[in-house]
Amino acid sequence: MRSSPLLNELIVALQFLPGIGPKSAQRLAYFMIEKGHTKSRILIDALSQCLEKIDRCKNCRTFSELEICSICSNIRRDRSKICVVESPLDVDSIEANSDYDGLYFVLFGRLSPLDNVLAEDLGLDQLEDLLSSGNVSELIVATSMTMEGDATAFFLKEIAARYSILITRIAHGVPSGGELEYVNSTTILHAFRGRQKY
């Protein structure tokens, strides 16, 4: 037990962050206290503002300060395509690394009955409303290549089929610059199954 209960409370609170264990939390807490209050107060203010003002976009469910996010409100985006992702981080990654010009739908997870994550927890009823509008011609599935990601993709395929919407899944395979001898068997399998005419 540390001599300061408040410092101990901060260390415990920091451990809820992903990848932060007891030692990392201790280092962060000491750093924030030791390095002066000005930058720590900036952090506190930024976090407070985010918690107070950021919610989910009414259309795609990503984080946004506005009711409709900047992507959904952009008239240049192709509204006939919706890319389904697991998290807002995936949206950021696709936006930064591709030329995709459609819309998104953020699940905030993936189907996992063992963890009590069901279809209603992922907003799939809201997605189905979007698909039933008749404006969407392609649903792009960008879920992870895990058992849960595959189960989610299969569930999305069934929903899209009800509305005769083309469903595609992003390709998974050997990374650029990767050597086959270092690639795992599942990745090689998907790379061969997803091969295209050259």
Image (spheres, rainbow, N blue to C red):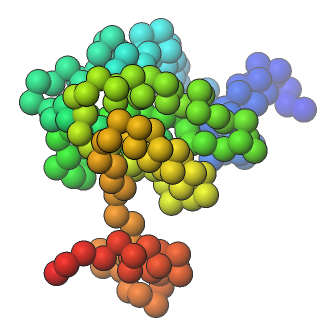
- Residue at image position (85%, 26%) is 3
> x and y percent of residue 46 in the render?
43, 18
Q: Viewer-proximal residue, 153 or 188?
A: 153
Q: Quadrant of the C terminus?
A: bottom left
- Quarter-wise, where is residue 62 in the image? top left
Q: Quadrant of the N terminus?
A: top right
> x and y percent of residue 76 in the render?
9, 30
**Residue at the outermost right position:** 1
Q: Viewer-proximal residue, 129 or 143?
A: 129
- Quarter-wise, where is residue 137 in the image? top left
Relative to 36, 49 lies left or right? left
**Residue at the outermost bottom position:** 181
Looking at the image, is 35 positioned above or below residue 192? above
Label total for image:
0
Q: Viewer-proximal residue, 4 or 78?
A: 78
Looking at the image, is 175 positioned above or below residue 135? below
> x and y percent of residue 45 in the render?
46, 14
Any part of residue 71 in sight: no
Relative to 27, 59 lies left or right? left
- Residue at image position (44%, 73%) is 190
- Residue at image position (29%, 16%) is 68
- Residue at image position (48%, 50%) is 153
Looking at the image, is 117 positioned above or below residue 5? below
> x and y percent of residue 9 in the render?
77, 23
Any part of residue 155 in sight: yes
Looking at the image, is 77 positioned above or below residue 66? below
